[in-house]
Image: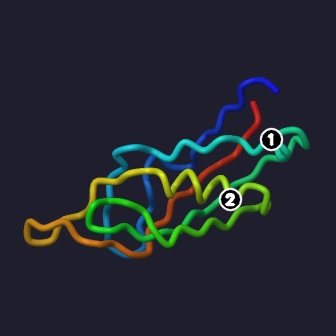
């Protein structure tokens, strides 16, 4: 299988509520081989929380096909974000959403 390009729906996480975080290292998912071999494409909504250092935890992916969920969660779990600040201090954030698209090209 040749190079597979993954195009994100958004270039940054979408927040639920008024919280903001900026990606410092974007998620870099790999296309799951069985999904690529079967010619299956899909989208995922990856929900997560951020600790005060900008590290994701409680990462859960919901995808159009379950074959993408593990890789989507792994990729977002390894990403890094600049956390939001409150009164000059970094704060934990809950309810973040990062959409991903798995598309064969």
Q: Which residue position holds label 1? A: 33
- Residue 92: image location, x then y, percent: 29, 72
The quadrant of the image that shows the C terminus is: top right
- Residue 15: image location, x then y, percent: 41, 67
Q: Residue at x 71, y 41 (%)?
A: 31
Residue 30 occupies quadrant: top right
Q: Residue at x 32, y 53 (%)?
A: 22
Q: Residue at x 59, y 69 (%)?
A: 60
- Residue 35: image location, x then y, percent: 83, 46
Of the image marks 2 and 1, the number of the one nearer the N terminus: 1
Q: Name above or below for residue 12 compared with residue 33.
A: below
Q: Which mark is residue 92?
A: none
Q: Which mark is residue 70?
A: 2
Q: Secondary structure at mark 1?
A: helix
Can you name the residue that lies furthest to the right here? 38
Q: Secondary structure at mark 2?
A: helix
Q: Name above or below for residue 46 compared with residue 4.
A: below
- Asked whether, in this view, residue 23 is left or right of residue 101, the answer is left
- Asked whether, in this view, residue 35 is left or right of residue 27, the answer is right
Q: Name above or below for residue 59 compared with residue 75.
A: below
The residues bearing labels 2 and 1 have C-alpha atoms spaced at a distance of 12 Å
Between 21 and 56, the residue placed more toward the observer is 56
- Asked whether, in this view, residue 78 is left or right of residue 92, the answer is right
Q: Name above or below for residue 105 compared with residue 42.
A: above
The quadrant of the image that shows the N terminus is: top right
Q: Residue at x 44, y 74 (%)?
A: 95
């Amino acid at each position: 299988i040749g190079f597979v390009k993954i195009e994100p729906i958004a270039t940054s996480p979408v927040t639920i509520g008024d919280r903001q975080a900026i990606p410092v290292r974007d998620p870099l998912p790999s296309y799951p081989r069985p999904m690529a071999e079967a010619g299956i494409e899909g989208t995922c909504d990856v929900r997560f929380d951020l600790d005060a250092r900008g590290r994701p935890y409680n990462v859960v992916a919901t995808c159009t096909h379950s074959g993408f969920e593990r890789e989507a969660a792994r990729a977002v779990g390894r990403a890094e974000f600049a956390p939001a600040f409150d009164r000059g201090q970094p704060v934990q954030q809950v309810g973040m959403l990062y959409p991903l698209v798995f598309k064969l090209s």
